[in-house]
Each structure stands twice: as C-alpha cells, then as structure tokens.
C-alpha cells in the first residue's frame, strides 16, 4: 500500500465503519463477511494514482443495505469537498473475472478489519486489470497502464489471466481480445499510449 491520498483511505475506513454499524444493527452474529473491492478504489489501494467517488464491491453474502446512508464526505488534499459512496449499481456478472479472483484478493491491512463484522479485501492487480477489459473506457485503460507501470504484472501475465477468465464466458469475446491486444501493446511499448 502506498502513502498517496491518505484522506481517501480514511474515508474508505469510515465507509467500512458504516457498513459494520449496519451489520451490528441487524443483529448479525456470524463469521465476518468479506467485501471484495474492485474499480477505482482498488486502483487507489494499489497505486494511489487517482481519486474516485464510487466504491465498486461484491460481497461474500447477500446483503440488504441502506445505500443512501452509505456515503462519506471528506476533504481532498487541495481542500476541495468530495465524497465516496457504495455504488448500488455495481454488478460483477457482466465484468470479465477470473474464477479465482476472490481467492487471490488481498486483505486491506491497517484499515481496521480486525474490529469489524465485515473485512475488506482488494482484487489483486492483474485481476483488477482483467475486470477492466470489458468496459475499457479511457479511465479503465489508464488504470491498467498505471498498474502495469507499478510492475504488478507483465503484458504476458495479463494475457494469460484474461485468457483463463474467458474460458468461463459465453458470447462474442472478439472485442475482449481486441481490447487485450491493444492494452498489451501499450504495456510493452509505453510510447504507444501517449
């Protein structure tokens, strides 16, 4: 974990506290739930290269959540007001995901998991990048390049993981292969991304 944008990390901790409070208010008494973080907040965890407002996550259990209450306001480094919220529209059904993405996720150390009924885990960098191949917006492409630039994976490792993931999908996957080829070339030749 890097040291960039500590205020965003603190806001994420406050959001986890709110989720914990929801679970405690429901009288949940089982083993801690697992929250699997994807999207921009996962990129923040690994690289600290950008801010994000929506928190994309899936969970080990089915949850009924008061999404309107799951917002945390904070001040960015430049003192502008911002907020983060748990995105109720995030759906991992249509994203490209490796079947081992949950097993290979990493625990977000130092955010207080030990005191909550919900533990925060983060997609590993290569699985996070694989998940971004399907939407593949400019931000997604930049996130993949940033993760590769931090030496979390090579283009070969990304292609291997994405190809393994594609074995579990039905439908026309040609566009995923095109996205994968484009970003792999940019990782191998960073000047192409300029």
Image: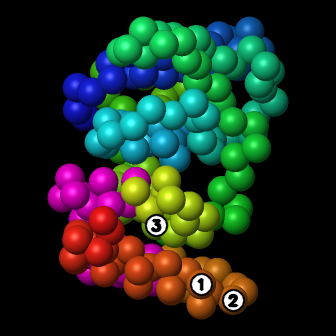
Quadrant where the image shows the N terminus = top left
Residue 175, which numbered label?
1
Q: Which residues are magenta?
A: 143-164
In the rendered image, the vertical position of residue 127 relative to residue 10, given as above or below: below
Instruction: Measure the alpha-carbon separation of dots 2 and 1.
Output: 7 Å
Q: Earlier in the sequence, mark 2 or mark 3?
A: 3
Colouring used for the render: rainbow
What residue did someone put label 3 on? 130
Quadrant where the image shows the C terminus = bottom left
Q: Point out residue 180 in the picture as x, y percentages from the top left corner.
A: 44, 79
Q: Label 1's element?
A: helix
Q: Is residue 184 visible to us here?
A: yes
Q: Point out residue 112 in the picture as x, y percentages from the top left corner.
A: 40, 17
Residue at image position (58%, 35%) is 55
| Image marks 2 and 3: residues in contact by CB distance under 8 Å | no
Q: Point out residue 167 in the picture as x, y percentages from the top left corner.
A: 55, 85
Residue at image position (33%, 40%) is 49
- Front residue of this view, candidates 4 and 25: 4
- Front residue of this view, candidates 1 and 102: 1
Q: Point out residue 90 in the picture as x, y percentages from the top left corner.
A: 69, 46
Q: Label 3's element?
A: helix
Q: Label 2's element?
A: loop
Q: Earlier in the sequence, mark 1 or mark 3?
A: 3
Which picture quadrant has residue 110?
top left
Magenta-colored segment: predominant secondary structure? helix
Q: Residue furthest left?
A: 151
| Image marks 2 and 1: residues in contact by CB distance under 8 Å | yes
């Amino acid at each position: 974990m890097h040291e960039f944008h500590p205020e965003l990390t603190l806001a994420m901790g406050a959001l986890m506290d709110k989720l914990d409070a929801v679970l405690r208010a429901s009288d949940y008494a089982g083993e801690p739930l697992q929250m699997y973080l994807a999207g921009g907040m996962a990129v923040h965890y690994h690289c600290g290269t950008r801010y994000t407002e929506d928190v994309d996550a899936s969970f080990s259990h089915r949850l009924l959540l008061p999404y309107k209450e799951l917002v945390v306001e904070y001040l960015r480094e430049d003192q502008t007001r911002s907020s983060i919220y748990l995105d109720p529209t995030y759906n991992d059904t249509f994203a490209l995901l490796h079947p081992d993405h949950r097993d290979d996720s990493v625990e977000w150390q130092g955010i207080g998991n030990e005191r909550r009924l919900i533990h925060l885990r983060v997609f590993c960098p290569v699985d996070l990048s694989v998940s971004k191949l399907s939407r593949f917006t400019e931000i997604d492409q930049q996130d993949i390049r940033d993760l590769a630039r931090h030496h979390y994976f090579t283009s070969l490792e990304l292609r291997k993981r994405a190809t393994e993931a594609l074995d579990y999908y039905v439908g026309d996957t040609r566009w995923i292969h095109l996205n994968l080829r484009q970003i792999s070339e940019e990782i191998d030749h960073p000047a192409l991304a300029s």
